[in-house]
Image (cartoon, helix red, strand yellow):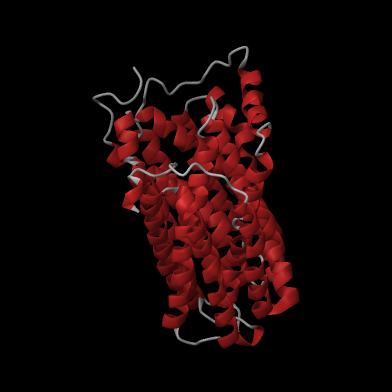
């Protein structure tokens, strides 16, 4: 029998922990690593380029996702990968005091990123197997909420903790070693908890590969890349966040850099509060508002307002770089404006990927391909952002980011979307 049984544990006992555990490794690889390397004196060019490569597993994860179906149960994949993530965190903690800490920790983050991307595949698949269809719909909000909680815990709580430990220990490497050691211990406990508590749905078993499995897998890719509007789709997926992909890589270094280097001179603890906590809450509010508005008005009607929302607030960083305000309240207010706009505008991007994947027999595969291009659109511009900033300085870099919105506008102008898509209400409700 598929789905949960009467003896299955309540979804409330495992969905929050599962999706918290899904979000935290991503935050550690993509966000904590930036703050840590900045604290340890690595240049913006090196930080942006090498941490940009960490997006690659999320770019190419559709290529190995069939292995999760063919080898073992998703339940076993989940807690096994959580053990692997915990081991990766421990390895980062042990490598930080070494003379070659930068190279050693990058290797560990690379392995963590692959484990995290594979964990995403297993967790999302398990969610579909372990819940009835009505439960799947009911717990979508719970999933996203605890993923956001992981972002706040990582970007906010752990960054604040690292800053506090730096003051207590007097050593940056020791402080971050303690943070990653705590993460390792936490993931060991999470893995043991899930090994014990996760449901055991009958449908969660290794799938015997059919004779046509390879052909079906390639067919999913082939049908996507044969689309007549492929160029328009890829242009939008790669360019819509061209400006934001560069901005997000340099926000933390900008907040941390001393004022004589063009930054705002915040402490690590202040960054944890301003950007990692208040900023993520603002991002979440913007995303919720975006979903509500699209449900009333439809994607096509809201596309241009949402494009403006994600692009226009970038100008606040030009003013921050020019004025270099001292007040954390003013800096926090600017971050809130940018993050609310980003969350609101990014909703259009997510709904458009659903629009692209809605037709045909390969909806899941096509959506996964879209998410791969989404990650690529963040990876490539972000890798170059540090070099551009060090050549231009912060003020001119943020001006450049504003100019980088122009390709996004051009890509959006080419879209042709069904006016009714995404809208649950009547046309007069908007």
Q: Nearer the viewer, residue 309 or 83?
A: 309
Q: In this rendering, would 385 be left or right of 361? A: right
Q: In this rendering, would 57 be left or right of 7? A: right
Residue ranking furthest to the right: 391
Count of numbered marks: 0
Q: In this rendering, would 110 be left or right of 32? A: right
Quadrant in the picture for the C terminus: bottom left
Q: Is residue 98 above or below residue 66?
A: below
- Res. 403 image quadrant: bottom right
Residue at 58 percent of width and 27 percent of height: 66
Residue ranking furthest to the top: 211
Q: Is residue 305 above or below residue 15?
A: below
Residue at 36 percent of width and 42 percent of height: 140
The answer to whether residue 71 is visible is no
Q: Is residue 206 above or below residue 412?
A: above
Residue 283, image x, y percentages: 43, 61
Residue 414, image x, y percentages: 63, 50
Residue at 56 percent of width and 74 percent of height: 315
Quadrant in the picture for the N terminus: top left
Residue ranking furthest to the left: 6
Q: Is residue 140 above or below residue 328?
A: above
- Res. 385 image quadrant: bottom right
Residue at 59 percent of width and 52 percent of height: 91
Residue 237, image x, y percentages: 61, 48
Q: Nearer the viewer, residue 183 or 386?
A: 386
The answer to whether residue 196 is visible is yes
Residue 374, image x, y percentages: 59, 48
Q: Nearer the viewer, residue 273 or 229?
A: 229
């Amino acid at each position: 029998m598929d789905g949960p049984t009467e003896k299955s544990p309540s979804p409330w006992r495992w969905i929050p922990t599962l999706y918290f555990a899904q979000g935290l490794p991503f935050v550690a690889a993509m966000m904590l690593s930036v703050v840590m390397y900045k604290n340890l004196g690595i240049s913006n060019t090196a930080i942006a380029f090498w941490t940009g490569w960490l997006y690659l597993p999320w770019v190419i994860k559709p290529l190995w996702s069939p292995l999760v179906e063919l080898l073992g149960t998703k339940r076993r994949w989940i807690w096994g990968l959580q053990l692997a993530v915990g081991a990766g965190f421990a390895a980062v903690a042990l490598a930080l005091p070494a003379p070659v800490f930068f190279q050693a920790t990058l290797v560990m983050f690379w392995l963590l990123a692959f484990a995290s991307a594979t964990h995403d595949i297993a967790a999302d698949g398990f969610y579909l197997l372990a819940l009835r269809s009505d439960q799947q719909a009911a717990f979508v909000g719970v999933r996203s909420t605890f993923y956001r909680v992981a972002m706040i815990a990582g970007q906010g709580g752990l960054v604040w903790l690292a800053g506090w430990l730096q003051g207590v220990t007097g050593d940056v490497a020791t402080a971050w070693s303690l943070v990653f050691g705590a993460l390792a211990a936490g993931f060991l406990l999470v893995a043991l908890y899930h090994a014990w508590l996760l449901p055991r749905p009958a449908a969660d078993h290794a799938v015997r590969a059919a004779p046509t499995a390879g052909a079906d897998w390639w067919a999913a890719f082939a049908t996507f890349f044969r689309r007549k509007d492929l160029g328009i789709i890829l242009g939008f997926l790669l360019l819509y966040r061209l400006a934001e992909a560069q901005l997000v890589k340099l926000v933390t270094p900008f907040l941390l850099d001393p004022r004589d280097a063009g930054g705002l001179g915040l402490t690590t603890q202040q960054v944890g509060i301003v950007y990692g906590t208040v900023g993520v809450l603002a991002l979440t509010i913007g995303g919720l508002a975006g979903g509500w508005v699209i449900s009333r008005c439809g994607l096509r009607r809201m596309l241009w307002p949402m494009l403006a929302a994600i692009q226009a607030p970038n100008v606040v960083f030009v003013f921050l770089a020019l004025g270099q305000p001292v007040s954390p309240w003013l800096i926090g207010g600017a971050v809130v404006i940018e993050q609310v706009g980003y969350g609101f505008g990014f909703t259009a991007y997510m709904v458009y990927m659903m629009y692209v994947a809605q037709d045909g027999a390969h909806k899941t595969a096509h959506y996964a391909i879209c998410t791969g291009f989404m990650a690529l659109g963040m990876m490539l511009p972000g890798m170059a952002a540090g070099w551009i900033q060090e050549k231009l300085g912060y003020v001119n870099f943020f001006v450049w980011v504003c100019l980088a919105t122009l390709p996004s506008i051009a890509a959006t102008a080419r879209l042709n979307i069904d006016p009714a898509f995404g809208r649950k209400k009547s046309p007069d409700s908007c």
